[in-house]
Image (cartoon, rainbow, N blue to C red):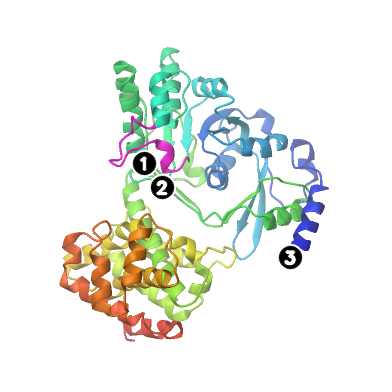
């Protein structure tokens, strides 16, 4: 959209009435809207971190529950920003979700009944946590919101935690709010809550539990033991690709609704919420809403990490070398698409134990369908960020398991070598990769000459990425060197060279 077109669209949008309860009836039949009486609902969920992912994911599930049970409306709590409240409070908490598949479907979500900004409305947040009708606390605050140290435990020297240690009744941090809210419930003789972390954090429920118990111990030993014995912190896994909100989306929503929505959100059609079946309070009918309950969240996590994320990184680094910009574009190259599918089925899948309720072959095909979704522009350059942190957990564990089992690793070495080529190309252009090790990677990339043996050795010396045992494994070293040489051809030759790594018909 040109600057003039964007300006014209913005002006047109701003002349439309605002989405809210009073205008909800004006929406045409092509847009789904709440099929329940919002005024009859009550808040049963306090959610910390109501960003885009929460609003496309957990809030959508609770929206489905409210059609059957009015007790699961959401109080959304922002620990910092006022922007969501400013955008959605005038809309009575209503917002539009665009679901992108082969076509786009629009749905107005009504699950947010209250939006609070913690620094300005602290007492209101604590009242919600103490309210007898509140049964669930859900969380999407990203890893940094947990105030953990490098060892994965709560960092008592973190500025927000130090504040909460000094003035515990007026908390700043997520753990501080949970400890104070649970203290108030215990003192009032109210039943316990279930606290559900939905962040992409390894062993998320257990880590949050340890952080909250440790912080509680600094205040009250008995409170800590009560939390430890009475409050459930189930592990979870969440998944759905959620592109950022853009002006183009706002224009699209305005055209569909005939109303102005200040903060619509969008996601792919696929979404998944897996929760460990461990609760300390009354909970909604999860499975009726499409949530998966299991006793093996780690199995789902491992499958997602290796199959989805491992394939994503492969597409990112190989696709960028081959001249593609998005996941869907990379999947449009037949040789690359077949290579990734073969790697998933023959090299990654054998390292996994399928958790109950998840068919791995069907999961692979569902992932590939998501990758081909033309409605989602998922940039390969963004997926390529932080490779030094992602590759060890997405691919190196799979390589280790295959080596131990005597299975081939030639295809698995390709994304590792592609990452090395990606870093080298960045450095030779004078740019640094977006990565915690950006300076070290830049120096290595500048020193590379294109000779596979020497270049690969420079990267394998990075102990923050490659464990010494794997870096010295002859089969792995040779495999990465061969892949590095294979990817050294010009971009047009890469797809054809990948065919050499596919099974012969």
Q: Nearer the viewer, residue 455 or 390?
A: 455
Magenta stretch holds residue 458: no
How far, Cα to Cα, is label 3 from label 2?
Answer: 37 Å
Magenta stretch holds residue 154: yes
Counting residues from the N terminus, which is met first, the one under dot 3 or under dot 2?
3
The magenta segment: 141-158
**300 shown above or below 44:** below
Instruction: Sort mark 3 into few (<14), some (14-19) or many (20+) by Cα contacts within 10 Å.
Output: few
Residue in the picture at 32% in, 52% down? 299
**412 shown above or below 28:** below
Q: Residue 475's x, y, as percent?
A: 18, 73
Q: Regarding mark 3 in the picture, which secondary structure is present there?
A: loop
Counting residues from the N terminus, which is met first, the one under dot 1 or under dot 3?
3
How far, Cα to Cα, is label 1 from label 3?
Answer: 44 Å
Q: Tell me: 232 left or right of 252.
A: left
Q: Regarding mark 1 in the picture, which secondary structure is present there?
A: helix
Residue ID for mark 1: 204
Residue ID for mark 2: 200
**56 shown above or below 173:** below
Picture quarter containing residue 438? bottom left
Q: Tell me: 331 left or right of 246.
A: left
Q: Residue 344's x, y, as percent?
A: 35, 68
């Amino acid at each position: 959209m040109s600057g003039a077109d964007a300006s014209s669209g913005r002006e047109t949008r701003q002349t439309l009435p605002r989405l809210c309860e009073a205008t909800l009836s004006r929406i045409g039949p092509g847009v789904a809207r709440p099929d329940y009486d919002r005024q009859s609902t009550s808040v049963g969920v306090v959610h910390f971190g109501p960003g885009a992912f929460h609003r496309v994911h957990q809030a959508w599930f609770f929206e489905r529950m409210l059609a059957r049970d009015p007790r699961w409306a959401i109080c959304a709590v922002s620990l910092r920003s006022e922007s969501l409240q400013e955008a959605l409070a005038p809309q009575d908490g209503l917002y539009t979700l665009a679901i992108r598949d082969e076509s786009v479907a629009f749905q107005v979500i009504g699950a947010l009944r209250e939006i609070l900004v913690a620094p300005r409305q602290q007492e209101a947040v604590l009242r919600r946590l103490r309210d007898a009708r509140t049964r669930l606390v859900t969380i999407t605050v990203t890893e940094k919101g947990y105030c953990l140290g490098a060892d994965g435990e709560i960092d008592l020297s973190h500025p927000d935690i130090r504040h909460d240690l000094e003035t515990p009744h007026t908390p700043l941090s997520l753990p501080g709010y949970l400890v104070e809210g649970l203290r108030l419930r215990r003192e009032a003789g109210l039943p316990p809550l279930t606290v559900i972390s939905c962040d992409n954090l390894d062993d998320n429920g257990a880590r949050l539990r340890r952080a909250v118990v440790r912080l509680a111990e600094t205040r009250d030993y008995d409170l800590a033991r009560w939390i430890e014995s009475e409050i459930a912190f189930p592990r979870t896994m969440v998944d759905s690709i959620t592109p950022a909100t853009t002006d183009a989306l706002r224009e699209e929503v305005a055209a569909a609704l005939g109303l102005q929505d200040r903060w619509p959100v969008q996601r792919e059609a696929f979404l998944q919420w897996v929760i460990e079946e461990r609760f300390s309070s009354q909970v909604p009918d999860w499975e009726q809403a499409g949530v998966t309950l299991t006793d093996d969240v780690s199995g789902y996590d491992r499958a997602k990490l290796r199959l989805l994320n491992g394939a994503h990184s492969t597409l990112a680094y190989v696709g960028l070398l081959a001249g593609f910009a998005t996941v869907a574009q990379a999947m449009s190259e037949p040789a690359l698409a077949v290579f990734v599918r073969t790697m998933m089925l023959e090299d990654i899948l054998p390292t996994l134990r399928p958790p109950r309720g998840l068919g791995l072959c069907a999961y692979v095909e569902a992932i590939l369908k998501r990758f081909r979704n033309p409605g989602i522009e998922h940039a390969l350059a963004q997926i390529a960020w932080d490779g030094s942190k992602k590759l060890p957990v997405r691919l190196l564990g799979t390589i280790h398991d295959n080596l131990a089992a005597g299975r081939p690793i030639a295809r698995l070495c390709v994304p590792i070598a592609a990452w090395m080529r990606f870093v080298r190309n960045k450095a030779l252009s004078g740019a640094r990769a977006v990565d915690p090790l950006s300076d070290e990677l830049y120096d290595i990339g500048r020193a590379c000459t294109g000779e596979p043996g020497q270049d690969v050795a420079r990267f394998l010396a990075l102990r923050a990425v490659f464990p010494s045992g794997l870096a010295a494994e002859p089969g792995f070293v040779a495999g990465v060197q061969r892949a590095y040489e294979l990817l050294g051809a010009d971009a047009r030759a890469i797809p054809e060279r990948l065919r050499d790594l596919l099974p012969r018909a």
